[in-house]
Image: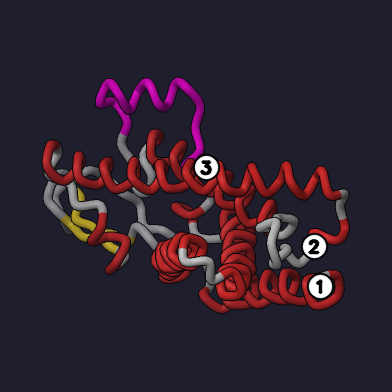
Amino acid sequence: MAEPNSPRTVVVWDLPTRLFHWALAVLVAALWISGHLDRLDLHMKVGAATLALLLFRLAWGVVGSPTARFAQFVGGPRRIAAHLRGEWSGLGHNPLGALSVLVMLGLLLLQAASGLFATDDVATDGPLAWLVASRTTKLLSAFHRLDSWAVLAMVALHLAAIGFYRVRRGENLVRPMIVGTKTVTEAAPPQRLASPWLALALLAAAAALVFGGLAVWGK
């Protein structure tokens, strides 16, 4: 039996959460590159895939493994203050990290949703642009362009935070998101991981909702 303060390896992130994280990173990079290269046909396909992935994450945040659930890691100002004082401990996202997750997911959802109605004012319209008035399309297009810079800023902040924790606190945040485990010394009860088959079913449902909806309503 391990001593109370002896190092031991515990599971932090389940496989669906890790795959979501890295898939989202790839898709966001693809969106940025395709958008700035004016490959809008590819941009819209990747945007639809990103929206499906985000909808999956919202569902997984309700029924997924403990560290993936919003109810587990989202806290208020008191929890953030405790973290800043060095009084918070736990697995998964720390309170500041949880806040950044919510902001990032919110920005990306707004980006994906606005892109459905956006236009480049030349030859390419979002698949649902025909459903709204021209003035609304222009407003959403302007927001879509502005929000892309907000997403980029959050990505930069995320990378800076990873560097800060690595250099100043000696904590590697990347490795657990790759292998799923980390070494801890504090007490950590074992997680009961949600089924990856449930994750696959949720992802399939999200993809069917997005791509099925676009097949019916999109142009």
Q: Which amino acid does label 3 sit on?
A: Leu
Q: Quadrant of residue 90?
A: top left
**Residue at the spot 21% in from the left edge and 60% down from the top edge:** 9
- The residue pinned by badge 2 equals 128
Dominant SS type (magenta): helix
Tag in front: 2 or 3: 2
Q: What residue type is labelled 2?
A: Leu
Q: Earlier in the sequence, mark 2 or mark 3?
A: 3
| Helix, strand or loop at mark 3 | helix
Q: Is 86 on the left or on the right of 37, as rendered?
A: left
Bin the neighbour count of mark 2 within 10 Å (Cα to Cα): few under 14, some 14-19, many 20 and up. Answer: some
Q: Which amino acid does label 1 sit on?
A: Lys
Residue 37 position in % (x across, y down): 47, 66
Relative to 50, residue 101 above or below? above
Dots 2, 3 in contact, CB < 8 A = no
Q: Is 217 on the left or on the right of 186, as rendered?
A: right
Looking at the picture, tell me which residue is in the foreground, 164 or 193. 164
| Magenta region | 70-88
Cα gap from disc 1 to disc 2, whole angstroms: 7 Å
Q: Is 219 on the left or on the right of 91, as rendered?
A: right
Dots 1, 2 in contact, CB < 8 A = yes
- The residue pinned by badge 3 equals 102
Residue 121 position in % (x across, y down): 70, 56
**Residue at the spot 85% in from the left edge and 61% down from the top edge:** 130
- The residue pinned by badge 1 equals 219
- Whether 82 is among the magenta residues is yes
| Helix, strand or loop at mark 1 | loop
**Residue at the spot 62% in from the left edge and 69% down from the top edge:** 44
Question: Tell me, what colour scheme is on the image?
Answer: secondary structure
Q: Is 28 on the left or on the right of 167, as rendered?
A: right
